[in-house]
Image (spheres, helix red, strand yellow):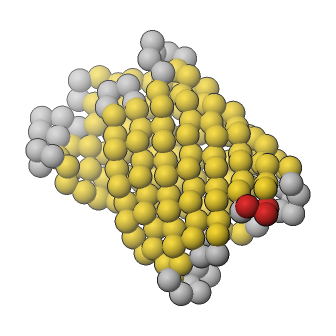
Amino acid sequence: MAHPRFAVNDFLFFTEASGDTDVMGNFFHANFYGDPDAAVTWNIGAGHLYHRIEPQNEDIEISVSMAKVGTVFRLKPWGLTFNPYIGYAWERIDTLHGDTDNDSYLYGLTVDWRWRMVGLNVKYHYQDSQELDDDFNNVHVRLTAGITRHWGAALRFDYMEHATTDDTSVLLGPVYVF
């Protein structure tokens, strides 16, 4: 759901990965923006990532809550928006062999491009771990294309590094615009 002052999206998915591994996941994000007509304004956001991965002889549950604040720069003639931000994430990983808590600072950049009924959204953030020796990269790319005034399609690619796994997912599905 998108509005000039906020954007909320949720991707719920189920899949079977290699080795008969069941994977269930959900990506939820909500962002709120200042003046939608300003060339420079503010942004605050929150999100939650959840993965349940069930390989043979293991259960892995990844839960990451995050919050961010940043500045939005709009180049309206080109349909471009840049949103550098800082944030904080609370990552919890539970396995049969132990649990990991990893709170992290986030440093990120979101770039949006819109042209007619096509949109491209690229998000990158660097996760500066506080409890672990490793830091992590996260990349999210979403391409949306309108087919009619209300219906379209979305393709999403996600690459996320975690303490116990690196996750790559590709999601494709319909979009309904209110």
Q: Residue at x 40, y 32 (%)?
A: 161
**Screen quadrant of the N terminus:** bottom right
In this rendered view, identify the residue nearer to me: 126 or 7.
126
Look at the picture and state if 34 lies above or below 152: above
Could you tell me if residue 138 is visible in this image?
yes
Where residue 9 sits: x, y (%)? 55, 61
Where residue 29 sits: x, y (%)? 58, 53
Quadrant housing residue 117: bottom right
Look at the picture and state if 68 lies above or below 31: above
Where residue 157 sits: x, y (%)? 41, 52
In this rendered view, identify the residue nearer to me: 145 or 25.
145
**Screen quadrant of the C terminus:** bottom right
Quadrant housing residue 105: top right
Residue found farthest to the front: 78
Q: Residue at x 21, y 43 (%)?
A: 54
Could you tell me if residue 6 is visible in this image?
no
Is 43 positioned to the left or the right of 19 in the image?
Answer: right
In this rendered view, identify the residue nearer to me: 133 or 53.
133
Is 114 positioned to the left or the right of 59 in the image?
Answer: right
Q: Residue at x 51, y 68 (%)?
A: 144
Is 106 positioned to the left or the right of 92 in the image?
Answer: right
Where residue 42 sits: x, y (%)? 82, 47
Is 136 positioned to the left or the right of 168 in the image?
Answer: right
Q: Residue at x 56, y 60 (%)?
A: 120
Report the label total.
Answer: 0
